[in-house]
Image (cartoon, rainbow, N blue to C red):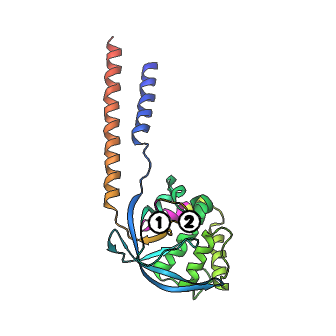
Amino acid sequence: MKIRARVIASMVGSVALCLGVPTFAQEVSVDFTGGYTTTWGNSGGDYGAGIYSATINGAPSASGIICDDFKDEITSGETWNANAYQASSLASTGNIANTMFGNTIGLTGYAEVATLVSMMFSGSSSYGGITGITQAELSSAIWYITAPGGISGLDAKATALVAAVELAFNGNVSAAKAYLATLTNLWILTPNPLGPGEPQEMWTEGLSVPEGGAAFLFLLLAGATCFGAMFFKYRNQYGNRVAA
């Protein structure tokens, strides 16, 4: 029985090694083509806001991209590499730490941002009892959530919107995970590499990542193969010990 227990423990450890692989992001190329649907102004001037036009991996993005990053800047025609994370994966993996603001606003902050991003992509102009919300107000609310200490210049409606989405999650990580898990069509494009002077983090919809899916399937198959090899190895070893 002791031998069997050691065998089972070894097999479990082997499976953990075989399948315990990190969740890989899909690297994509993002090109900001210069268009945006609205502007937002505060004491520092006017900023492009709303939905930006872009190509991803050389193909025009049907949904466009939405910026959640007020501190960095991009210019028309700028191209950069980004790691694409499915928003739903933030609920069950360590991807949140690899995003631009995951270490500061956490899962609840990204759930708040995702709420506003989803509103912009869907064309929704109401949240709770707040109606007539513009894309400029959505952008400024997003930037307020991600910027350390917030940003100045929000109007009354954007200020109310920030308070409403913060109250909806109220620091509840379980609620944030449950909501993010539903967002299978929403993707976060985090600049790679991250660091001073990096481009902005963006969100997009309906991103196709066949290469990443193929890679993940390969890892699953490799893990299953590894498990099978370990199983037969230990079964043979145990059989030899019993026979001896």
In the rendered image, which quarter is residue 10 located in?
top left
The location of residue 156, given as percent across then percent down, is 67, 85
- Left/right of residue 230 with respect to residue 6 in the rendered view: left
Discs 1, 2 touching: Cβ within 8 Å: yes
Pointer 1: residues within 10 angstroms few (<14), some, or many (20+)? many
Residue that sits furthest to the bottom in the current view: 132
- Left/right of residue 54 with respect to residue 166 in the rendered view: left
Secondary element under disc 1, as helix, strand or loop, is strand
Observer-nearest residue: 102 or 20?
102
The location of residue 136, given as percent across then percent down, is 56, 84
Residue 133 versus residue 208 in the image, above or below = below
The amino acid at mark 2 is Tyr
**Label disc, if present, on residue 110 of the rendered structure:** 2
User: What residue is disc 1 on?
Assistant: 188
Q: Report how far apart the C-alphas of labels 1 and 2 lie in the structure.
A: 10 Å
**Is residue 221 located in the magenta-colored stretch of the structure?**
no
Instruction: Give, as a single range, the part of the protein colored magenta.
Output: 177-192
Pointer 2: residues within 10 angstroms few (<14), some, or many (20+)? many
The amino acid at mark 1 is Ile
- Left/right of residue 89 with respect to residue 137 in the rendered view: left
State the residue at coordinates (43%, 65%).
184
Secondary element under disc 2, as helix, strand or loop, is helix
Observer-nearest residue: 99 or 195?
195
State the residue at coordinates (44%, 42%).
20
Q: Is residue 164 visible?
A: yes
Observer-nearest residue: 113 or 56?
56
Residue 194 versus residue 236 in the image, above or below = below
The location of residue 231, given as percent across then percent down, is 34, 31
Image quarter in which the C terminus is found: top left
Q: How many marks?
A: 2
